[in-house]
Amino acid sequence: MSFFDAEEGFYHGYTLGLFVEYLNRDGKKSKLKAKDLLAQALCHEIDHLDGILYTDKAMNLEDIPVEE
C-alpha cells in the first residue's frame, strides 16, 4: 500500500517484502518472493483483485490529490 504525501509531493510505500503463490500461464502453481517496488506493486494489484481501492484504506479522503 502506498499513499500520496501532499506536503512532500510523492508516494510513500510501506511494503518491505512479500511471498506470493500464484498460477502461471500453464495453470501450474508458482511462487515468487518480492521486495521493494515489486512488492509494493503486487500488493497494489492484489488489492484491486480483492476489490479494495486506495480510498478504502485512506485515513483522510480530503488529503487525496484531485486531478483537474
Image: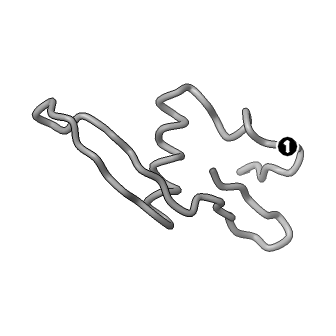
Q: Is residue 7 left or right of residue 19?
A: right
Q: Amino acid at mark 1?
A: Met
Q: Nearer the viewer, residue 46 or 16?
A: 16
Q: Farthest residue in the left direction? A: 26
Q: Nearer the viewer, residue 64 or 58?
A: 58
Quarter location, residue 8: bottom right
Tally of marks: 1
Residue depicted at 28% across the width and 47% down the height: 31
Residue depicted at 85% across the width and 43% down the height: 59
Q: Farthest residue in the bottom direction? A: 8
Q: Nearer the viewer, residue 9 or 44?
A: 44
Q: Is residue 51 left or right of residue 4?
A: left
- Disc 1 crowd rating (10 Å Cα; few below 14, some 14-19, many 20+) is few
Q: How is the image coloured?
A: one colour
Residue depicted at 30% across the width and 37% down the height: 22
Q: Which type of secondary structure does the marked residue at label 1 adopt? A: loop
Residue 16 vertical placement versus 54 (above, below): below
Residue depicted at 73% across the width and 33% down the height: 56
- Residue carrying label 1: 59
Measured as percent of width and height from the top left, residue 66 is found at 76, 49
Quarter location, residue 25: top left
Q: Is residue 28 left or right of residue 43?
A: left
Q: Farthest residue in the top direction? A: 51
Q: Is residue 52 left or right of residue 19?
A: right
Q: Nearer the viewer, residue 44 or 15?
A: 15
Measured as percent of width and height from the top left, residue 35 is found at 46, 64
